[in-house]
Amino acid sequence: MIKYYLLGMVFLNTLTIYSQEAKRNMSIKDFLSIPSVSNIQISPDGKSILYILTESNWKANKQIKHVWQVDSNGKQTKQITFGLGNESEPLWSPNGKWIIFLSKRNADKGSQIYLMKSDGGESRQLTKHSTSVSNLSWSTNSKKIFFIANDSMTAIEQHSKTDKNDVFPFEENYKQKHLWQVDLEANKKKITSGDYSILNYSISNDGKKLAVHKSPNPLPDYSFHSEIWMMNEDGSNAIQLTDNKISEIANNRLFKTGARISPNNKTILFVAPVNDKLEEYYNNKLFQLNCSANSNIDLLIKDFPYEVSAAEWSSDGRRIFFVANMGSQSQLWEYQTSAKKLIQLTRGEHSIGQWTYNQRDDEHFLTIKTMENPGDIYSFKKGKFNQITHHHDSLSVKFNLPKQEVIKWTGSDGVSVEGLIYYPHNYNSDTKYPLVVQTHGGPRASEKYGMSLRYTTYVPVLTGLGYVVLQPNYRGSTGYGDEFLRGMVGGYFNESHLDVMAGVDLLIDKGIADADKMIKMGWSAGGHMTNKLITYTNRFKAASSGAGAVNWISMYSQSNVRNNRNEWFGGSPWQKNAPIEAYWNSSPLKDISNVETPTLVIVGENDPVVPMPQSVELFRALKSNNVPTHLYIAPREGHRWMELKHRLYKINVELEWFAKYALGKSYEWE
């Protein structure tokens, strides 16, 4: 049975209860239990929205995703899927009669398509594909559904697996990914086939054309060499549009990205991290090309200082809307194609978490992230925001939340650097506070306004314990122009680590940070930075290196992604006259004998991005030099940990370490 919530009534009652209680500091489990909103989808009539709400289920030891529905005026919200199946990608049919979504109700078969009537009722499983299904789209006539799936194992391969005669050739045992179609009676048709993979696709407004990203194979490192093709909706008349070996971005975890076909089917819009000469390692930019072979690729907005995250056409093709990463914030922009006029549509101390555009009503739907709200859905039309969901309204009423502020400082070479600082709710300017310095992953990323729900940072927990937190957008971060991003070209730690320390010194000079109680932590590229800083300075009293690289030479062969390394170090470590010196000079392991900072090392056992051997190298080096350390390995986890108990353990063990070595205190585990 579908649960209905008169959201306004529930919200008012909830706030009444919370307002009668004193605010409290956020515990780890409080933080890890905050829900998140994603996958916003607008109904054809613009009156209703589907979305995914992700909630923590501690009994199941994981986060569960379910499909929810809300009126576009925000008056009524309901949950429409239940259980432990984990749903994703909800979509309305163009005629408004059906809803589809993916669910993992049969874990052995992965995600499959489920179909239900839009006016309610039980869903039914539409596909029983032999492999997991993803990237759903409706045909414009509402009769068929497109999806991507890996090819199946052959009968011989399946027998060998069952018989445990399953020795395999490394990075040769993949299955290609192809585009399929299924009708409402579960009849399937394969649209593409061959020795290549389809990474993503989009459908033209009239439903007659497909733009696809075709890659040599599905391995992550090869996705950077995918090309854009155009074909008929049945897969016929395929034409290759690009042949340039640049990284036309096919997927983005937050936004619906990939090549977008213009309303008149004459032009393709796409995002790529290159300059106007199609040279790699620049901020993501907006490009277009004609839908014909050997077409020129044109940079649309020259000298735009920010990074384009995702873009979409207006219904008449005269405007392009896009989200821009502007360093510490992200905002919505409009580009008028004929006038070549650029307009910033949204402003404010926030970032955009998810975004979708309704061509029919010229209306935007997005999640807005602030320190008080990590991302409820808003509509944006004619310059006005309207809040639609209220899943996070109670946070600022129930908990003591930190004050968030953007600060600026000057790097060692005079370049302006920016970062975010978080103060405890009861901050006193006459008091010096223990400081936690967190460096972001990527490194092609930036910290922005808003409460991040990353278990790797957990800022509200730290400020509740009396720490000040600094998140510097060091050299190499996105959203600050190409020269700033390319500060890592020719050497990963040219200025980036110095940018971090200059920000630390600013907080000490201002009397905010206690120089004798400083902590360094980070995950992925944030872990790389931790490893560098503990070899560069002994000013930190405690550190935590999460999934960090310590040896760039061995990292090159161990990681499943090598694309950026050649830019950083001037080539691969395997080529003739390899730049081995550049790799080694940027490796924290080179200077590991300098380390005195007690350092935790944390990694997932199955991490393909920054594999466990990097953490083992760091741990053994620290151990041999008698530096206090522990290596914690999470079974079953990759680069992003999924099990709630593992996330809880990570935070507990870090807080205990920080308390012991930076504060000289004991810590009681949650």
Image (spheres, rainbow, N blue to C red):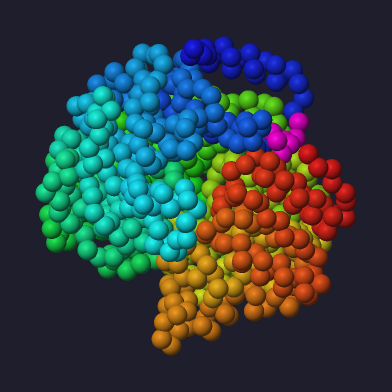
Q: Position of residue 554 (x, y in %)?
A: 55, 73
* Residue in the image at 67% along x and 55% along y: 633
Side of 463 where 241 appears, left or right: left
* Residue in the image at 21% along x and 30% along y: 140
Residue 367 in sight here: no
Q: Position of residue 20 (x, y in %)?
A: 74, 17
Side of 100 where 371 appears, left or right: right
**Camera-nearest residue between 533 and 381:** 533
Q: Position of residue 151 (x, y in %)?
A: 33, 47
**Camera-nearest residue between 98 and 27:** 98
Side of 552 where 522 appears, left or right: right
* Residue in the image at 31% along x and 31% along y: 358
Using the image, determine if residue 326 lies above or below residue 355.
below
**Camera-nearest residue between 132 and 651:** 132
* Residue in the image at 56% along x and 49% along y: 640
Using the image, determine if residue 563 lies above or below residue 427.
below
Q: Quadrant of residue 370?
A: top right
Residue 390 in sight here: yes
Segment colored magenta: 24-30
Q: Quadrant of residue 505?
A: bottom right
What is the quadrant of the C terminus in the image? top right
- Numbered disc total: 0
In the rendered structure, does residue 29 fall within the stretch colored magenta?
yes
Q: Position of residue 530 (x, y in %)?
A: 65, 64
In the rendered structure, does residue 559 fall within the stretch colored magenta?
no
**Camera-nearest residue between 161 and 111:** 161
Using the image, determine if residue 394 lies above or below residue 422.
above
